[in-house]
Image (tube, rainbow, N blue to C red):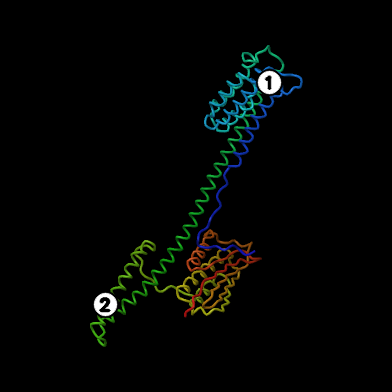
């Protein structure tokens, strides 16, 4: 499988995962507890041969249904809902599951321990009160002891499960926030690398155009004083050329001063692929570099040749940092009307101690230049080697 193509459109990092599905699972468990508690107290209605009075049926069915309605409002009224459920427990026992779920939800929200304890105590008191003063008030029986024990145990489990669920949700939220912050830092780092590369390109453009326009201004100034032509025409034309050239140079400097910084002077023309030999000789001071070229680089347009030179320079630097001492193979191919193909390949060196100061931003800079030139770049490990392959359009001179 070929390595991925990286274009200058930008690097998109994955969004951190959100804990949304866990909320769905928690809601399903909440309703399951409420429904099971309700159905448990409806079992006496299913005993064959016994037809309970209508009042008993209503006291078993309606409070449970009311508990479902209240449970649906737990997000808006997390404290009021369990309090009202306690009142329903005084009328009938079927909302006990909804009460457990409401207490668990309150604990999951991270409310104060005092609030959770008071609400849980109220549920317990309401359950105990239903044995003594509610519609089911009877002399104390063993069944009451069992139900009270189940209620105490259910409340303890509800508080524990709710607290653990809240702790887990808090951890996931904090992790998502940390992942998002890390992503923003990484994106800022890549954006900084692109901005630095664009500034470098702008500086080169300034240097080249400043040099050329200085020559135009100089020769146009000399032409203004020639006497072998119609003097007025030659003088006016040359003065116009001189004025426009100077204005162009002033405007260019004004626009790009913020990019390259004030106080700098134009440099000589930037190197192109015709200066590749000196670059390779410099690289050979650090590691072996072999050049295989089948392209007539002298015919490459100067702007493309400058970009290609910087790409080769960055690729060789990248090889020196991450595979120090390893032999590097540089291949150039292509012709006018097609593509210029630049390949820099070096063997992987797992035992080496590469310089990681650049943090991988060299490839970002290469992608930026290639993208501006309308080309593509592929990089990655292929077998036992690491390859960087660049394809750039080679305009036909005709």
Secondary element under disc 1, as helix, strand or loop, is helix
- Sort mark 1 into few (<14), some (14-19) or many (20+) by Cα contacts within 10 Å: some
Q: Does the image show residue 121?
A: no
Q: Does the image show residue 181?
A: yes
Tell me if 90 is positioned left or right of 273 in this view. right
Q: Residue at x 23, y 82 (%)?
A: 232
**Residue 132 image offset from top left, x and y in percent:** 63, 13
Q: Residue at x 51, y 69 (%)?
A: 311
**Residue 189 image offset from top left, x and y in percent:** 49, 55
Q: Is residue 178 above or below residue 150?
A: below
As drawn, the residue found furthest toward the bottom would be 228
Q: Residue at x 50, y 73 (%)?
A: 279
Secondary element under disc 2, as helix, strand or loop, is helix
**Residue 188 image offset from top left, x and y in percent:** 48, 54
Upstream in the sequence, badge 2 or badge 1? Answer: 1
Mark nearest the camera among 2 and 1 is: 1
**Residue 128 image offset from top left, x and y in percent:** 63, 17
355 or 3: nearer the eye? 3
277 or 18: nearer the eye? 18
368 or 349: nearer the eye? 368
Say which residue label 2 marks: 239
Residue 177 - label: none
The N terminus lies in quadrant? bottom right
Quadrant in the picture for residue 271:
bottom left
Say which residue label 1 marks: 147
């Amino acid at each position: 499988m070929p390595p991925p193509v990286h274009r200058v459109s930008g690097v998109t990092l994955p969004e951190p995962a959100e804990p949304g599905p866990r909320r769905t699972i928690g809601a399903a468990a909440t309703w399951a507890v409420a429904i099971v508690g309700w159905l448990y107290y409806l079992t006496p209605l299913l005993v064959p041969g016994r037809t309970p009075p209508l009042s008993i049926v209503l006291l078993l069915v309606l409070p449970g249904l009311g508990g479902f309605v209240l449970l649906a409002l737990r997000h808006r009224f997390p404290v009021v809902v369990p309090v009202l459920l306690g009142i329903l427990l005084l009328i009938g026992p079927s909302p006990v599951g909804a009460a457990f779920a409401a207490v668990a939800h309150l604990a999951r929200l991270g409310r104060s321990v005092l609030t959770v304890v008071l609400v849980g105590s109220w549920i317990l008191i309401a359950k105990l009160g239903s044995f003594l003063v509610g519609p089911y008030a009877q002399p104390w029986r063993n069944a009451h002891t069992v139900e009270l024990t189940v209620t105490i145990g259910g409340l303890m489990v509800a508080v524990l499960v709710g607290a653990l669920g809240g702790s887990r949700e808090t951890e996931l939220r904090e992790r998502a926030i940390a992942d998002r912050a890390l992503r923003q830092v990484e994106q800022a780092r890549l954006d900084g690398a692109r901005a630095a590369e664009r500034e470098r390109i702008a500086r080169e453009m300034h240097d080249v155009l400043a040099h050329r326009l200085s020559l135009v201004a100089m020769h146009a100034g000399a032409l203004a004083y020639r006497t072998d032509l119609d003097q007025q025409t030659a003088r006016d034309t040359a003065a116009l050329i001189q004025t426009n050239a100077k204005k162009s140079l002033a405007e260019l400097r004004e626009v790009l001063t913020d990019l390259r910084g004030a106080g700098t002077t134009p440099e000589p023309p930037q190197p192109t692929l015709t200066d590749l030999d000196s670059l390779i000789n410099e690289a050979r001071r650090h590691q072996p570099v072999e050049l295989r070229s089948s392209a007539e680089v002298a015919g490459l347009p100067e702007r493309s040749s400058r970009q290609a030179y910087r790409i080769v320079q960055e690729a060789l630097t990248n090889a020196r940092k991450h595979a120090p001492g390893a032999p590097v193979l540089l291949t150039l191919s292509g012709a006018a009307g097609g593509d210029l193909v630049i390949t820099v390949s070096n063997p992987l060196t797992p035992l080496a101690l590469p310089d990681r100061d650049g943090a991988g931003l060299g490839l970002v800079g290469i992608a930026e230049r290639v993208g501006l030139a309308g080309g593509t770049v592929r990089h990655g490990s292929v077998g036992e080697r690491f390859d960087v392959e660049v394809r750039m359009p080679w305009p036909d001179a005709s």
